[in-house]
Image (spheres, rainbow, N blue to C red):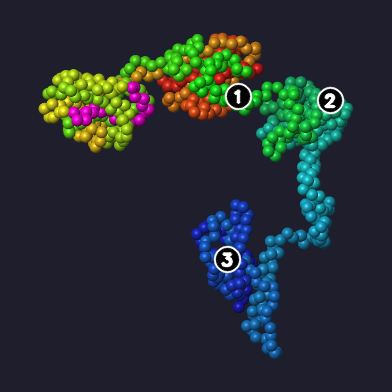
Amino acid sequence: MTVQANLPPTNTNSDGVTTTFNYGFKVTREEHLKAMYTVIATGETGDLEIDSVTGVGNDGGGTVTFATAPADGMIITVDSIAPLSQIEAFTGNKLPPATVERMGDAIAIQNQRQQSQIERSVRFPASDDQIPTLPAKAQRADKILGFSADGSDFAMVEGAAASQAYVDQAEAQADRAVAAATYPYTGGEQKTGAFMPGAGESLTLFTYNAVSDAAVTLPALAGLAAGYNIGICRTTGSGDLTISADDGALINGSSSVVLASDYLCLDLTINEAGDEWVAVDKALIGLPVGTSANNIVVLDNDGKLPAVDGANLLNIEDQLSRDMSASAMALLMAQADAAALAGSVGPFKHSNNFQSDTLPTSTGATYDAANDRYGPSTGADATTDSYSETNKDTDVAMYQGNNEEVGQALTLASAKTIKSVKFWIKRVGSLSGNNLKAEIRAASGTVGTGAVPSGAVLGTSSNVGMGTIGTSYAWVTFTFSSPVELAAGDYTVGLVWPSGGVGNSSNRIDVGSDTSSPTHSGNAFKTNSAGSGWSAAAGEDVCFDLIAAGDPEDMTLVDDTITIGASAQAVLAYFLYQPVDTVTLGTDLLFDVSIDGGSTWAAAVVGEDTFAEIGDIAGTSKKLVRALVDVSGQSGTSQTYRLRSANAKTWYYTDYVGDIAIF
């Protein structure tokens, strides 16, 4: 046998399906093979159990098979673990060829295994005449491995903290070299500093920290491209640093600039025209971290500020505390037995729970004294859906046991308050003493083809005596005892024969319908047993007229003005409202503030911190809203607010927690 120069290991990517993998080197025993995996994404490694092997003794190798396919995204490594021992022995004076060949193969396989390991190790080039020895483990513990100045020996860098210092030192030396090569100067110690660079800014940096005054000369513009950048920083205790250009080029329109503030940096960049330097102040970083004078304050591991003296801090808004205070007041206001509240409460102004009609302006609104709230006024009752009597071509006969309920399925596109319904009907024969009524239910099935009544009755009309119905077709009105509040959706409205009512084919009610060319978007339905067993009539529409309360008007609610200090920048307000329809802040509910007595208004802009619902008030359907309105564009001291509804959406204004002017 021979051994070809095929070095182990063999690496193959897994796909989550394949169970058999090739190896391309010779082994003489199955147990001389080892399989391992490496997860490509994480570097995780581990051993794999080989189920079966082929190709033992073959120069070109063979395959290994696993009982379960390795997961996708791995490198599968098949390696040689042939022993380094020699197990053959000779007896007598004979050298059997087979034994000699096995020994030769074993040596070749051992060499291949070792050569594979050598080629994957860190090696010194042959030109190095001396190879250093690593320090003992006690000397190299918790250190970074480096090299001496001439590279001939190892050098150890102290600890994790010192390791970072070593990296910082290397970066500093590199930056210093770049700075010195770019443009060296005298009059102050050169070393690296840093400011916060913007996009595309270079890292050519100087720090000046000499005590005496000094001057720095920028390079001539000739040969430098637009956007070329230099950063110069000045530290505490330094003298003034005067900066000018070698060729007299202007800096921000002047012949020179003076850097005279502690911890100030300038970002100097050649403008697009390439004929002037533009200097921009930058905040210096790299200062001492801590809470003492001239320190930079850094957040801790939890993202929190350390303990500092905040006595000189201005314009700090404690939003959480204000929200909590407003929520507590809102909960009090939302209680039905809360005492009348109007005026100022602590820092809040305009506070009011409207136990009386106190708003000076309430256009398009109605005050509800029973519920202490303002809601939109409504227009005149109007038809919300109908099918004209001019379409009638069929009589639907209603009497006991025959069409005891007849009606129409329909869809409401928006919420409506149903007041009454009319049907195009007539009386045939004598029906005195019997009463007819109308009912509304939800619809199930597809409106237009197969919708029928479903669920409980949502609304029942007052009775209409059948004897009062004329013998010629006419509209007869059925008024609901209480207006029926319906959300957008599918419904049925039908005429219902009374239980036990007397009637027959000669004494009946005829309902007008259209079976020849129905055009309503809904469909008719019928049943011979009122209250159950309905069937849809896809090709028929009943003549009806559904009357709803008028749409809500758009409200405008304005409160009195109060006097505030001059130069207010914003007004923070909290109020409660109670939605009936789905309401979107900034679209269906608008909030404005004026500090000039209502001459101009600033609108609340929807945002988590500017105009948003904080949450629901427990035990009520009221919602607490925060509005932070920017009034910096106005001037004045007469502050008021305005609430407006839009898009015919119904909601109630229940309580004004109050507002705070922010300066």
Mark 3 vs mark 1, foreground winner is 1
For the residue marked with disc 2, what is the amino acid? Asp
Secondary structure character of the magenta stretch overall: strand
Residue 582 quadrant: top left
Report the front residue among 25 and 377.
377
Q: Quadrant of the C terminus?
A: top right
**Residue shown at the point (69%, 73%) measured from the top left:** 84
Q: Quadrant of the N terminus?
A: bottom right
Is 304 on the left-hand or right-hand side of 355?
Answer: right
Q: Which residues are magenta?
A: 482-501
**Residue shown at the point (54%, 57%) measured from the top left:** 71
The answer to which of marks 1 and 2 sits earlier in the sequence is 2
Mark 3 vs mark 2, foreground winner is 3
Q: Which residue is mark 2?
A: 240
Is 557 on the left-hand or right-hand side of 208?
Answer: left
The number of callouts visible is: 3
Q: Which residue is mark 3?
A: 49
> Dot 1 lies on which element?
helix
For the residue marked with disc 3, what is the amino acid? Glu
Residue density around tag 3, few if under 14, some if 14–19, many if 20 or more, within 10 Å: few
For the residue marked with disc 1, what is the amino acid? Ser
**Residue shown at the point (50%, 26%) measured from the top left:** 623
The answer to which of marks 3 and 1 sits earlier in the sequence is 3
Residue density around tag 2, few if under 14, some if 14–19, many if 20 or more, within 10 Å: many
